[in-house]
Amino acid sequence: QVRLVESGGGLVQPGGSLRLSCAASGSIFSIDAMRWYRQALGEERDLVAVIGSGGTANYADSVTGRFTISRDNAKKTVYLQMNSLIPEDTAVYYCNADIRPSRFITSLPYWGQGTQVTVSS
């Protein structure tokens, strides 16, 4: 069974930094795109950043220049480095990945449980 487990959330002051991690485990043949989403209270879940298996990354306009997504394929882990945080970044951050559990199965979407990020003084 495939699992995604996030870590690294917490409380940070405006202007501060946090690094989120999301590790995949279980029966995994390969991992395609990996993404970070976030959902603020009362809002829809929005895409923050995506990184392909080759390392190509794209970002939401609201985080471009402040956030960096990266991945370590050997560790089956995706990261989100968040700098210059502002209160509007407060949300639950979710990891998402397209994973092939075996070479006989096409990619399926998997989600982590989410980690809270709060930006406040």
Image: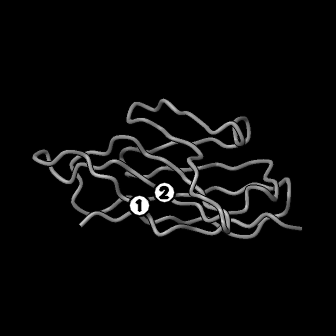
Q: Residue furthest right?
A: 121
Q: Is there a contact, CB below 8 Å, between mark 2 and mark 1?
A: yes
Residue 103's tag is none
Q: Position of residue 66 (x, y in %)?
A: 73, 41
Residue located at (34% from left, 65% from top): 3
Is 14 situated above or below 118? Answer: above
Q: In the rendered view, does 119 fall on the left or right side of 68?
A: right
Residue located at (59% from left, 58% from top): 44
Q: What's the residue type where badge 2 is placed?
A: Cys
From the image, tell me which residue sits under label 1: 111
Q: Secondary structure at mark 1?
A: strand
How packed mark 1 is, by other alpha carbons closer than 10 Å (few <14, some 14-19, many 20 or more), is many
Is 28 situated above or below 62? Answer: below
- Locate the N terminus and report the quarter of the image it occupies: bottom left
Is 102 situated above or below 118? Answer: above
Q: What's the residue type where badge 1 is placed?
A: Trp
Q: Position of residue 116 (x, y in %)?
A: 63, 69
Looking at the picture, the colour scheme in use is one colour
Q: In the rendered view, does 9 fall on the left or right side of 3?
A: right
Looking at the image, which is closer to me, 14 or 25? 14
Q: Position of residue 99 (x, y in %)?
A: 29, 50
Residue located at (53% from left, 33% from top): 57
Q: Position of residue 77 (x, y in %)?
A: 43, 52
From the image, tell me which residue sits under label 2: 95
Q: In the rendered view, does 7 fall on the left or right side of 19?
A: left
- The tag earlier along the polypeptide, 2 or 1, is 2
